Image (cartoon, rainbow, N blue to C red):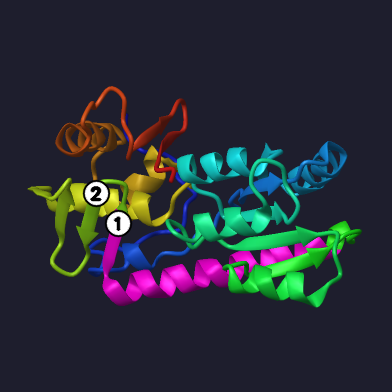
């Protein structure tokens, strides 16, 4: 099937090395938030409000559950109550800092400055005293995530490396490793993988991938993308039929999710 009547903006062929790694997340992305509080009405209210801004919200009601969820899933930010059953918020914050630098906002009903200082010393990025204005809370969430995202992007650009799960890409040497073993990719396979990993959560149609990776003037059709994705999966996925890096959005295209 030839590409006919395309309206996309032309993308020059021969993309410069490293350009894909510097592409920004232009699409609106859903922030992933973990809300931890034993007061279910508060959790319900926060969740409802955040979901109105298209955020993905998980909830936990005690410290042990929160710690388990933080280990199992990556979040953009955690809202963590100070007073929790099973394990208090300060302990949870300290434990999370042992394995993650995810931003944490402490929620506290106490106005004691010492509690706030302790939270910050244990690794929290900010604190909000109850009762709080939900609009202020959302503003703080977005501000902290923006700062955190910019920091990660700058660090990634500085290192010229992309590391996700068991896979590492060196965008300077154009080498790929899975579980420490080097994987030989073709130039287009490398560019395709680099684009998807650099923009987690963004779904690219086959037309978009063909235009970006192969160039607007490429005479082939979208089946070229499918063939390269299949070969790429065979090289990097432990089970190509159950991928963990290159996912299919049926009827749309391909994407990577972290």
Q: Which residues are magenta?
A: 136-163
Q: How dense is the environment of label 2, judged by Cα within 10 Å: few (below 14), some, or many (20 and up)?
A: some
CB contact under 8 Å: marks 1 and 2: yes
Which picture quadrant has residue 114? bottom right
Which picture quadrant has residue 239? top left
* In magenta segment, residue 155: yes
Residue 8 position within the rendered picture, expressed as x and y whole percent measured from the top left: 47, 52
**Quadrant of the rendering where the N terminus is positioned:** top left
The circle drawn on residue 167 is 2
* In magenta segment, residue 198: no
Dominant secondary structure (helix, strand or loop) of the stretch shown in magenta: helix
Q: How dense is the environment of label 1, judged by Cα within 10 Å: few (below 14), some, or many (20 and up)?
A: some
User: What's the distance in space between the residues labelled 1 and 2, CA to CA?
Assistant: 6 Å
Give whichever of 90, 42 is nearer the camera: 90
Give whichever of 88, 3 is nearer the camera: 88
Residue that appears at 79% across and 65% down: 128
Residue that appears at 40% across and 43% down: 256
Give whichever of 117, 157 is nearer the camera: 117
Q: Secondary structure at mark 1?
A: strand
Q: Is residue 57 above or below residue 14?
A: above
**Pointer 1 residue:** 163
Q: Is residue 116 above or below residue 44?
A: below
In this rendering, would 206 be left or right of 48? left
Q: Secondary structure at mark 2?
A: strand
Give whichever of 9, 124 is nearer the camera: 124
């Amino acid at each position: 099937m030839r590409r006919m009547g395309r309206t996309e903006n032309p993308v020059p062929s021969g993309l410069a090395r490293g350009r894909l790694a510097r592409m920004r997340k232009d699409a609106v992305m859903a922030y992933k938030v973990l809300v931890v509080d034993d007061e279910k009405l508060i959790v319900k209210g926060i969740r409802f409000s955040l979901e109105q801004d298209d955020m993905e919200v998980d909830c936990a009601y005690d410290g042990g559950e929160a710690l388990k969820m933080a280990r199992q899933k990556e979040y953009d930010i955690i809202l963590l109550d100070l007073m929790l059953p099973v394990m208090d918020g300060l302990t949870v914050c300290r434990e999370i800092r042992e394995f993650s630098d995810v931003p944490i906002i402490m929620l506290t009903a106490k106005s004691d400055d010492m509690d706030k200082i302790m939270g910050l010393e244990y690794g929290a990025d900010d604190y909000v005293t109850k009762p709080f204005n939900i609009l202020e809370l959302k503003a703080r969430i977005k501000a902290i995530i923006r700062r955190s995202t910019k920091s990660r992007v700058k660090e990634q650009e500085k290192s010229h490396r992309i590391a996700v799960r068991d896979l590492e890409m060196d965008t300077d040497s154009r080498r790929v490793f899975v579980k420490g073993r080097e994987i030989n990719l073709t130039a287009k396979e490398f560019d395709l993988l680099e684009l998807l990993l650099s923009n987690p959560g963004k779904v690219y149609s086959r037309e978009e991938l063909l235009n970006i990776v192969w160039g607007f003037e490429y005479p082939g059709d979208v089946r070229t993308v499918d063939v390269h994705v299949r070969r790429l999966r065979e090289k990097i996925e432990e089970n190509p039929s159950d991928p963990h890096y290159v996912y299919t959005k049926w009827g749309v295209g391909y994407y990577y999710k972290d």
